């Protein structure tokens, strides 16, 4: 997560994604620049994201609000060079 924040702060386009193991729709968010914020759910500092999922049309919210606690270890980050 630190690397994702670092890359977003350097101007890279960074996304975080989760693949649903059931084969149904997963979820993707954009990591936005900034220092991140403390997440009680995930314990520690997490990136802020732009999430456009159902009931989540927010310009900024914690990554841990975009993905439930049970998905923490399965969220992957990608950045575009």
Image (cartoon, rainbow, N blue to C red):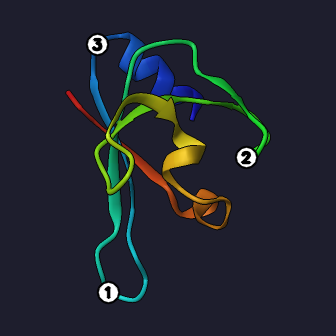
* Marked residue nearer the N-terminal end (2 or 3): 3
Query: What percent of the width, then of the height, locates residue 10?
Result: 35, 10
Near mark 2 (Cα within 10 A), the count class, few <14, some 14-19 or many ≥20, is some
* Marked residue nearer the N-terminal end (1 or 3): 3
Indicate the secondary structure of the residue bearing disc 2.
Answer: loop
Check if mark 1's residue and mark 3's residue have beta carbons within 8 Å: no
Closest to the camera, between mark 2 and mark 3, is: 2
Indicate the secondary structure of the residue bearing disc 1.
Answer: loop
Tell me the CA gap for discs 1 and 2.
Answer: 25 Å
Residue 39 shown left or right of residue 28 in the figure: right
Towards the viewer: 65 or 54: 54
Near mark 3 (Cα within 10 A), the count class, few <14, some 14-19 or many ≥20, is few
Query: What percent of the width, then of the height, locates residue 9?
Result: 40, 12
The residue furthest front is 55
| Disc ID at residue 11 | 3
Towards the viewer: 1 or 25: 25
- Splitting the image into 4 quarters, where does residue 25 fall? bottom left
Tell me the CA gap for discs 1 and 3.
Answer: 32 Å
Q: Residue at x 34, y 69 (%)?
A: 26
Check disc 1 and report the residue beneath it: 23
Tell me the CA gap for discs 2 and 3.
Answer: 25 Å
- Splitting the image into 4 quarters, where does residue 64 fall? top right
Query: What percent of the width, then of the height, locates residue 13?
Result: 25, 27
Near mark 1 (Cα within 10 A), the count class, few <14, some 14-19 or many ≥20, is few
Indicate the secondary structure of the residue bearing disc 3.
Answer: loop
Check disc 2 and report the residue beneath it: 42
């Amino acid at each position: 997560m630190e690397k994702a924040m670092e890359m977003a702060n350097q101007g890279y386009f960074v996304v975080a994604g989760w693949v649903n193991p059931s084969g149904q729709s997963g979820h993707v968010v954009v990591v936005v620049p900034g220092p991140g914020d403390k997440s009680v759910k995930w314990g520690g500092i997490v990136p802020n994201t732009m999430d456009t999922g159902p009931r989540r049309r927010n310009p900024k919210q914690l990554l841990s609000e975009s993905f439930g606690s049970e998905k923490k270890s399965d969220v992957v980050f990608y950045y575009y060079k």
